[in-house]
Structure formats: structure tokens, C-alpha cells
């Protein structure tokens, strides 16, 4: 499976941030950041356009039970790279009962995606705030949430690898899950139990506890979502990204949220970036102008 480093790694290193002058200079170093189709955006549920074709063509997700995955802290976020090898297949647009042991991909198709095209899951990334009143990149009716999870997929029907798909037409789809505070989430616990091992930038850990990425999807039937054309939310901010934002949130506990907030954005033994306290939080890009784009909804 393709590595996940291509999404956020700028041409000249990772010397960028989410605050102050660093954020305002994204457009100087990465021209795509000044584009007309940038993400994230505010989702206005009252003006979103219902698209009947989305309801008629269900979003299909065929994820597998991953027995090995890598958890890492790159100083900007927590990244999860699943490594599906030989796995137990579970098909889901209502998680139908069909299972078999074989070598599988983590595949998404249907919905707003091009017909007969498949998109393979590459990695998961988290964005969160220092406080519960912020953290998500997308907002819904101008309301922010404590966290947002992104599942990035690339088009294996058109392109040979992730890097080749970046910035290309129909190359990338990112599924977004809004996260709110409530009851403990068993799926997220697979990760929060290991976060202390990657507290500092540059730390990573290979985990052999089995998990299915579908555990992060709040609506098993995948029926209700918004979709629009946007971009990566971090440098180099390539466009031609199809976004799918699920209507219903995922719930995690306050204790689980605090595990993320204990992470550091600098390497162990090194000082934090100038003007920062060193905590890895508020790692979200502000919403961008929607301009002439249309946000479609799969529901009324």
C-alpha cells in the first residue's frame, strides 16, 4: 500500500504551522493554498443542495480487519497507516455479513465517486482543539467541534500510487467524521492506549492489535452526508479532492480527548517552535471561502 507521507509534506520540509505568521504564509510557499477550491469550509445545512442521485447510488465501503498498523506523531497530527496484508473481509453499505480470509484492500466506491472507480484507504489523520469549543476543520452551520477525523483514499483505478493521484482529477477522496465529547469509544481506544508512546514529534509505533477502520464511521449504512470539491487542508493544499462529510458525529470520552491534548509538537529534548508552548493541539486550518462551489447533500 502507498505510504502516507505525500499528503502534508511540503517540498522543502515540514517547517509550517497552524498559527500566526506561519499560517498566513502558506500561500507564499504553496500557491495552491490561494486557489478557488480550498478546504475546509463551513457546511450550511439550509443551503446545501439535495442530490437524489447520491441517495440512489449508495456509498460502498469494503474495509478489512487490519492486524497491523503504524501510529505516528509528525508534529502536526497523529497519523494512522493501516497495513491490511491477509485479513478478514467485511463488506459494508449496511455491513453485510460476508467474510473470507484473503489479501484485501481498504476500498471505497459509489456515492459521489466516479462510476466503476475504486479508492483505497491510505491513512487516517486527526485534528483537535485545546478546548472543546474548537478543533474540527469543517464547521456545520458555523459550529465547530472538538475533533475531526479524516480518512484519505486515492484512486487505484486511474493512478499507480498516492503521489501520482495528488492534485489530479478524481485522484483523492477524503471522508470526514466530526467528533463530539460523550461516551467512551472502543474503536478510538485502540489508538489512545498507545498515544503516550508517540508523545513527541518523530515518534512512531507499530501496533498489532486488530482493528477495522469502519469502527470510525458513525453511520453504518453511510446514507447521510454532504459532499463538495475541495483541497487538502494542509500544505501543499492540492485541489481536486472530493470531500465526504458525514452528518452524524462520532463520540469519544473526555478522557480520550485529553490523551490527544497531551501530545507534543516538537522532538524529545528539543525546544518547541518559537512562540509556541509545545503542545500539539489547535491543529486545524480555518474555514475557506466556498465561492461558487455547491455543497450537495445525500438527504433532505
Image: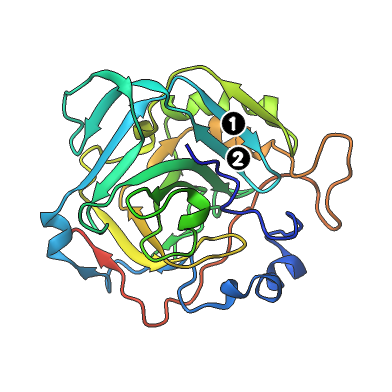
Q: Are marks 1 and 2 in contact (CB under 8 Å)?
A: yes
Position of residue 196 relative to residue 4, above or below, is above
Q: Looking at this rendering, what residue extends furthest in the bottom direction?
A: 292
Query: In percent of the image, x 56 and y 21: which residue is there?
Result: 207
Query: In percent of the image, x 39 and y 40: which residue is there?
Result: 250
For marks 1 and 2 on the same chain, the one whose residue lies earlier in the sequence: 1
- What label does residue 122 carry, if any? none
| Apparent side of residue 270 relative to residue 99 in the rendered image (left or right) | right
Spot occupied by residue 109 in the image (x, y as percentages of width and height): 26, 48
Q: Pointer 1: residues within 10 angstroms few (<14), some, or many (20+)?
A: many
Position of residue 163 relative to residue 67, above or below, is below
- What label does residue 71 carry, if any? 1
Q: How is the image coloured?
A: rainbow
Dot 2 falls on a residue whose secondary structure is strand
| Apparent side of residue 259 relative to residue 21 in the rendered image (left or right) | left
Spot occupied by residue 11 in the image (x, y as percentages of width and height): 69, 60
Distance Cα–Cα, label 1 vs label 2: 7 Å
Spot occupied by residue 161 in the image (x, y as percentages of width and height): 47, 48
Q: Pointer 2: residues within 10 angstroms few (<14), some, or many (20+)?
A: many
| Apparent side of residue 173 relative to residue 296 in the rendered image (left or right) | right
Dot 1 falls on a residue whose secondary structure is strand
Query: In percent of the image, x 58 and y 72: which residue is there?
Result: 33
Q: Nearer the viewer, residue 171 or 134?
A: 171
Query: In percent of the image, x 30 and y 44: which residue is there?
Result: 108
**Can residue 300 be seen in this snapshot?**
no
Q: Nearer the viewer, residue 37 or 255?
A: 37
**Can residue 158 be seen in this snapshot?**
yes
- What label does residue 78 carry, if any? 2
Residue 107 quadrant: top left
| Apparent side of residue 180 relative to residue 108 in the rendered image (left or right) | right
Amino acid at each position: 500500500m502507498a505510504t502516507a507521507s505525500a499528503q502534508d509534506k511540503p517540498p522543502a520540509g515540514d517547517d509550517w504551522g497552524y498559527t500566526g505568521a506561519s499560517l498566513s504564509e502558506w500561500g507564499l510557499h504553496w500557491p495552491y493554498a490561494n486557489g478557488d477550491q480550498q478546504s475546509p469550509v463551513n457546511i450550511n445545512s439550509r443551503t446545501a443542495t439535495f442530490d437524489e442521485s447520491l441517495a440512489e447510488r449508495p456509498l460502498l465501503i469494503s474495509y478489512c480487519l487490519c492486524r497491523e498498523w503504524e501510529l505516528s506523531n509528525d508534529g502536526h497530527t497523529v497519523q494512522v497507516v493501516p497495513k491490511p496484508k491477509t485479513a478478514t473481509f467485511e463488506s459494508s453499505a449496511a455491513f453485510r455479513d460476508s467474510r473470507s480470509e484473503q489479501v484485501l484492500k481498504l476500498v471505497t466506491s459509489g456515492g459521489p465517486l466516479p462510476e466503476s472507480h475504486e479508492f483505497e484507504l491510505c491513512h487516517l489523520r486527526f485534528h483537535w482543539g485545546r478546548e472543546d469549543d474548537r478543533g474540527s476543520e469543517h464547521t456545520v452551520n458555523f459550529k465547530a467541534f472538538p475533533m475531526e477525523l479524516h480518512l484519505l483514499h486515492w484512486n487505484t483505478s486511474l493512478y499507480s500510487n498516492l503521489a501520482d493521484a495528488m492534485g489530479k482529477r478524481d485522484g483523492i477522496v477524503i471522508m470526514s467524521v466530526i467528533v463530539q465529547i460523550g461516551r467512551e469509544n472502543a474503536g478510538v481506544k485502540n489508538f489512545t492506549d498507545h498515544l503516550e508512546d508517540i508523545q513527541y514529534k518523530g515518534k512512531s509505533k507499530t501496533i498489532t492489535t486488530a482493528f477495522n477502520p469502519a469502527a470510525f464511521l458513525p453511520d453504518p449504512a453511510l446514507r447521510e452526508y454532504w459532499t463538495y470539491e475541495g483541497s487538502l487542508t494542509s500544505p501543499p493544499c492540492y485541489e481536486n479532492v472530493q470531500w465526504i462529510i458525514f452528518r452524524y458525529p462520532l463520540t469519544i470520552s473526555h478522557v480520550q480527548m485529553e490523551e490527544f491534548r497531551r501530545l507534543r509538537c516538537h522532538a524529545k529534548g528539543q525546544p518547541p517552535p518559537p512562540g509556541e508552548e509545545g503542545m500539539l493541539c489547535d491543529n486545524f486550518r480555518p474555514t475557506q471561502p466556498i465561492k461558487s462551489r455547491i455543497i450537495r447533500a445525500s438527504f433532505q
